[in-house]
Image: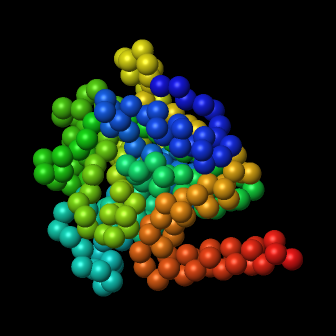
Amino acid sequence: MNIPNTANSFEELHEFFNGVPSQKYIWLYRGQANASWKLKPKIGRDEYNVGGTGLDRFRAWKSKAVAHINLPNNEWEQLAIAQHYGLSTFLLDWSENPLVAAFFACHECPDQDGVVYIHAPGKIIDYNIIKSPFYIDDALRDGFNDFPPSLAFYPNAIDKRIINQKGVFTIHSTPQEELKSYEIFDPNLKDNLYALRIKSEAKKDVLDKLHIYGIDNHFLFPDLGGLSEFINYETRGIIEGRKRVK
């Protein structure tokens, strides 16, 4: 796969995404609005790093979340909801949709280059077998001796955000470490992690084109907060249009 270093327009992004060999590998996409941010789960970052996987913090969250939401019985799905609503966990958010990743790479930090990561996880967790994230250490010791750089799991359709964002999660047993590229024994690919930088000057163009395709705050965050930001985006466009007329 021919991987460019940077994208300077939506058209270059589109060309890159068209070249991804989706029929052979499961590729996941993640956008980060600042290319200098490390590719690691939030619980592994300095301000949240309590050591280990931080699952005790998830337990504390769960004990209080029941006052606000009817949680599913499955603890993987509970963890997915916690992650989507901002809890620091040992998960990383990815999407099956590259356009979603492009949005998250561009919707913040307008003066900084963004980045889209593309990753083929080593294994997919069946959480009918590994029934809880609290069992992940046992899973790694029993049958996962060749532990890949990340495991992944696909949540059920438990939340509108997860559905619209086509959300997938990777699981990191050592969240203090950055996700690294591992070799794939394929002469056309070589490894399972790539980064495509989006230049800051291209961010507005990318967001405008994504808006045409329906990838915007209102779609990705189907709640009042997302709707408000969508209207704000349209308002900024109206103001810019008036300035051009003058």
Viewer-closest of 91 and 158: 158
- Depicted 181 relative to depicted 246: above or below: above
Residue found 74% across the figure and 51% down from its top: 201
Viewer-closest of 95 and 7: 7
Viewer-closest of 7 and 82: 7
- Which quadrant is the C terminus positioned in? bottom right
Q: Is residue 131 visible?
A: yes
Asked if residue 126 lies left or right of residue 18, the reply is left
- Depicted 191 relative to depicted 138: above or below: above
Q: Horizontal and vertical percent for residue 160?
A: 33, 70
Residue found 31% across the figure and 44% down from its top: 152
- Residue closest to the far left: 129
- Residue closest to the far front: 245
Asked if residue 27 lies left or right of residue 126, the reply is right
Q: Is residue 36 visible?
A: no
Q: Horizontal and vertical percent for residue 219?
A: 44, 69
- Residue closest to the far top: 187
Q: Horizontal and vertical percent for residue 171?
A: 35, 46
Where, by quadrant of the figure, is residue 103 drawn?
Answer: bottom right
Residue found 53% across the figure and 43% down from its top: 14
Where, by quadrant of the figure, is residue 65 drawn?
Answer: bottom left
